[in-house]
Image (cartoon, helix red, strand yellow):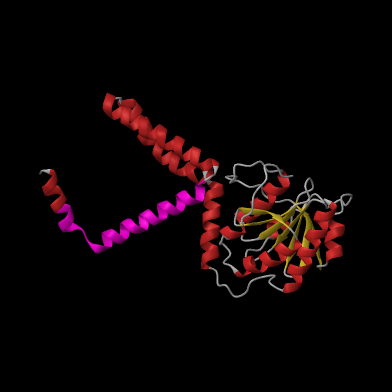
């Protein structure tokens, strides 16, 4: 059977469901690649493909039966190891699926009091160069992160936030988590960012502020202890060079957007080369 005849046979047996099948597989592949873009998983996946591809090619071309047998029998073990090797990416993927399938009955914390209080407090913290991370819970509950700090469940106010981030306060190095118009917990430990594709250096505070938005749909506001600059993070993206007025305008826009939606391109300001 020549090549043209093979093409004609394939085209004759091609069904609409085959096209649908190919589109679904392509969409899933693209989604998986977009999830691991900018993470260490890219290098890991490239290494696995390179070792298996070169090894199998060499075994077939050179007739290396033992090497081919070893690589072929290693594939089942690799399938078991993949969930372990790519655990952060798989978790993020499942969270995105669950977030998309959730019923959007309400958006937590959209009241103007929370926005005004957080914006004013961030402005005063910036004036005093007091480092801070304020996390605003949305649809995904942040219970596992609030458990790493001190549970408070107190009324939200500017003075309360300033007292928590006072440099000599025992809780000032951790993050404050806000649920609705209540301070849920303080002194919380957040996950550090995994995707740092900006090409700039960040300190631990900014990496933690970005990290919590990579793993959840929360918003985070960070104040640099070194420069006094305010930044906001959403969906793994960071915007800097803000003041309390800009923050007061941006927060309602992000609250009303979909949980997985990134910060609009027009809101992305210049990112300096160093942040604390």
Where does residue 111 sit, x and y in percent of width and height? Answer: 71, 74
Residue 32: in magenta span: yes
Left or right of 191: which side holds 51?
A: left
Left or right placement of residue 69 versus residue 244 in this view: left
Picture residue at 28% right of the left edge, 24% below the top? 62
Magenta stretch: residue 129 in it?
no
Q: Is residue 28 above or below residue 114?
A: above
Q: Which residues are magenta?
A: 9-37
What secondary structure is the stretch in magenta mostly built from? helix
The image quadrant of residue 256 is: bottom right
Tell me the quadrant of the picture where the C terminus can be found: top right
Q: State how many labels appear.
A: 0
Q: Nearer the viewer, residue 222 or 97?
A: 222
The quadrant in which residue 124 appears is bottom right
- Residue placed at 66% from the left, 63% from the top? 141
Residue 86 spot, x, y in % from top left:
52, 45
In the rendered image, residue 42, in percent from the top left (x then y), is placed at 49, 41
The residue under the point 63% across, 42% down is 200
Residue furthest out toward the right? 168
């Amino acid at each position: 059977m020549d090549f043209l005849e093979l093409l004609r046979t394939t085209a004759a047996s091609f069904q609409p469901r085959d096209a649908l099948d190919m589109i679904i597989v392509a969409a899933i592949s693209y989604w998986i690649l977009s999830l691991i873009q900018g993470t260490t998983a890219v290098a890991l996946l490239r290494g696995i493909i390179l070792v298996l591809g070169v090894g199998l090619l060499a075994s077939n071309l050179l007739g290396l039966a033992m090497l081919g047998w070893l690589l072929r029998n290693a594939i089942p073990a690799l399938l078991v190891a993949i969930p372990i090797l790519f655990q952060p990416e798989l978790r993020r993927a499942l969270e995105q699926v669950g977030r998309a399938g959730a019923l959007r009955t309400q958006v937590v914390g959209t009241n103007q009091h929370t926005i005004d209080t957080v914006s004013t407090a961030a402005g005063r913290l910036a004036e005093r160069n007091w480092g801070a991370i304020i996390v605003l819970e949305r649809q995904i509950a942040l219970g596992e992160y609030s458990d790493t700090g001190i549970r408070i469940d107190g009324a939200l106010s500017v003075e309360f936030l300033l007292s928590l981030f006072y440099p000599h306060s025992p809780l000032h190095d951790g993050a404050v988590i806000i649920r609705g118009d209540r301070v849920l917990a303080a002194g919380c430990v957040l996950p550090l960012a995994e995707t740092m594709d900006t090409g700039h250096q960040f300190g631990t505070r900014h990496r933690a502020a970005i990290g919590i938005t990579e793993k959840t749909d929360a918003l985070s506001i960070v104040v640099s202890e070194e420069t006094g600059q305010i930044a906001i993070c959403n969906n793994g993206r960071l915007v800097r060079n803000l003041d309390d007025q800009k923050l007061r305008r941006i927060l309602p826009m992000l609250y009303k957007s979909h949980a997985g939606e990134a910060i609009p391109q027009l809101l992305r300001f210049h990112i300096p080369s160093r942040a604390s």
